[in-house]
Amino acid sequence: MDLSYKEKQKLKEIESWEVEYVNKKENTIIRKIGNKANQVIKPLKDKININIDSKVNEAIQTAIVGCMNLGQDVVKFTYDKEKAVKELNRNDVRKIEDLYKVDITELESISKSIIMENKLVGLAEGFAFGMGELTMALADIPVFFGITFRVMQQIASIYGYDPENDKEKLFMIKLLSFGSALAPAGKAKVLSELIALKVGIKKYTFKQMQEMGGKYAVMMMARETAKNCGARLTKNTLLKGIPILGGAFGATFNYGFICKIAEVTDNMYKKRFLEDKLSRNTNVYEDIEFTIVD
């Protein structure tokens, strides 16, 4: 199936964004604050006299794995995965699998509205939980990742992919890694894994993918992503545990993180949507081998 002129332009834009994103060195205000976090956190650690880093890291890892297991099943009740189908109200689009018939510009506008909704929810949630102390900051972690996966699932459904499908869970976990990576080398590595994963999703069943390597099962991949995210987000979580400062930082950090994950998810699903639409009448994956960089 051929793409419209606007869709061809959109694909070029996404490809340019992808190159820019991978090569960009993250140097945000939040990261600068995080780099100085130890100076602020040290008195808190000394006062509580526990290994806070370990507890926060463990909480983050548990939250991510939980969101990909029970959490994702709970989150799906907070939104309608057929939102795009209902808003479009077209006779030829009765279910999310029919969304390939729609021009991507129409789907993009729906995606933008749900992204803004979730960014505002994340901002409010970060401020509320950040006004407490460390206990509240720890309680914020599963809620925060619940919101993060919620917006990822919604974006997937808007572009015609079922977020309850196990293969889509794998893709979203890898997108979380892509969105939270900081160094260009790390982003390039995850991008190569995403490309290979897209091929695997097209060529194989979920069971076949599991048999190729247990580490690509949903929970195994979730644990690896959780481990990486836990190490990166520990300092930011601790800053949320400082009253007054924590409220402002929690709101800013949550908003910024969800913005970034939503941007990555939106662009990568748009690219996948366009590639799949273009290949509907040709098997472009026929001679491609399924390999993932470790």
Image: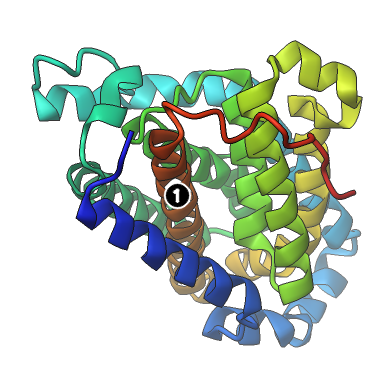
Q: Residue at x 65, y 83 (%)?
A: 25
Residue 278 lies, in percent from the top left, at 40, 39
The residue drawn where x is 46% and y is 42% is 275
Residue at (73, 54) in percent of width and height: 192
Side of 129 relative to 68 (left or right): left
Q: Position of residue 167 (x, y in %)?
A: 63, 24
Q: Looking at the image, is 17 positioned above or below residue 217?
A: below
196 or 239: nearer the eye? 196
Q: Which quadrant of the rendered structure holds the N terminus?
A: top left
Residue at the spot of label 1: 271
169 in relation to 24, above or below? above
Q: Quadrant of residue 243?
A: bottom right
The three-letter code of the residue at mark 1 reads: Lys
- Mark 1 is surrounded, within 10 Å at the Cα level, by few (under 14), some (14 to 19) or many (20 or more) other residues, namely many
- Residue sitting nearer the eye, 236 or 17: 17
> Can residue 213 be seen?
yes
Residue at coordinates 72% horizontally, 65% vertically from top-left?
188
